[in-house]
Image (cartoon, rainbow, N blue to C red):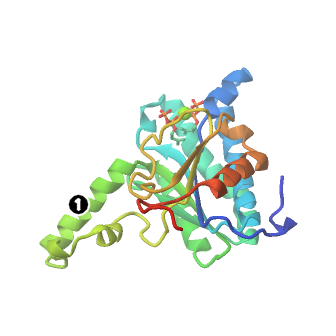
Amino acid sequence: MPKASDGHQEALLQHLAVIMDGNGRWAQKRGLARTAGHRYGAEKLYDLCVMCIKRGIKYVTVFAFSTENWQRPEAEVSQIMDLFIYFFNKYKDEMKKEGIRLRFSGVKDELPDRVKDTITEAESTSETRKTLQLILAFNYGGRREIVESSKKIIAAVQRGELDPDDLDEEKFRDYLYLPDVPDPDLIIRPSGEQRLSNFLLWQGAYSELYFAKVLWPDFTENTLDKALNEFAKRDRRFGAIEKE
Ligand code: IPE
Ligand code: IPE
Ligand code: MG
């Protein structure tokens, strides 16, 4: 496993987002239960944090469980919930040492109490850490986030705290789950699928997208560097024309 202390590189981007997909296929290929794939995927998440720190990346958002993933068999869902807790317990000390702040993005209310308690503890104990923000999109859905933001806006208008005429894109952002987090520069999706599956719909409006065939548990530093090299070559125009 790479160590963050191997030396920091100059940051190519500020915020990386990753759809951690392909755990099930990874396990199936080995004749293992899907949960084994989720377990390896969780270990890989810590590796990813270290890779990001080495490269000077300040935010990494990972898609770990979508609002649609509740449709999976109850046993698999329950094992994913347990893995969430396992991950925090296993890497608690390392994350402290590396200066990793943990944040959660998604619908907390619907999660089991044991998961909610883990989130509260992980967030509150890591709040002042500065090296990397690890944002776990867990029970996250992009459409759901936009609907919830809209409801918060309506409530603010009804309370007389917000004038609808003042609502613009910048103001709307204030009502998203994590308004202070900059938009992701790059979204990587391993596993061969080429879709967003309801991930960061608002924030990803101008993100560069990179799709890799590798399954998430097999993701390596080499995969990340290939994506970053490709990102470095992209011309981010944001709707404008190329600069002279
Ligand atoms: C991603 O891996 C993890 C979650 C969605 C929770 P999958 O479980 O979707 O793996 P595949 O896509 O079936 O291989
Ligand atoms: C997206 O993967 C969600 C996560 C990786 C957590 P899925 O496996 O749920 O997405 P689909 O079903 O292939 O679109
Ligand atoms: Mg999948």
Question: Residue 182: image x %, image y %?
Answer: 49, 68
- Residue furthest right as drawn: 6
Label 1: which secondary element: helix
Q: Nearer the viewer, residue 9 or 79?
A: 9
Question: Residue 227: image x %, image y %?
Answer: 67, 49
Some atom of ligand 2 lies within 8 Å of the CB belonging to the residue at label 1: no
The image quadrant of residue 107 is bottom left
Q: Which residue is mark 1?
A: 151
Q: Nearer the viewer, residue 208 or 19?
A: 208
Answer whether residue 93 is visible to the viewer in this image: no
The image quadrant of residue 36 is top right
Name the residue rendered at 41%, 38% in the picture.
68
- Residue furthest front as drawn: 244
The image quadrant of residue 198 is top left
Name the quadrant of the C terminus.
bottom right
Answer whether residue 131 is visible to the viewer in this image: yes
Name the residue rendered at 46%, 73% in the picture.
180
Question: Residue 207: image x %, image y %?
Answer: 50, 55
Name the residue rendered at 24%, 60% in the picture.
150
Residue type pointed to by label 1: Lys
Give the vertical position of 15 relative to 200 (above or below): below
Dot 1 surroundings within 10 Å: few (below 14), some, or many (20 or more)? few
Give the vertical position of 172 relative to 233 (above or below): below
Q: Nearer the viewer, residue 202 or 143?
A: 202
Q: Is residue 235 left or right of residue 131?
A: left
Question: Residue 239: image x %, image y %?
Answer: 41, 59
Ligand 1 found in image quarter: top right
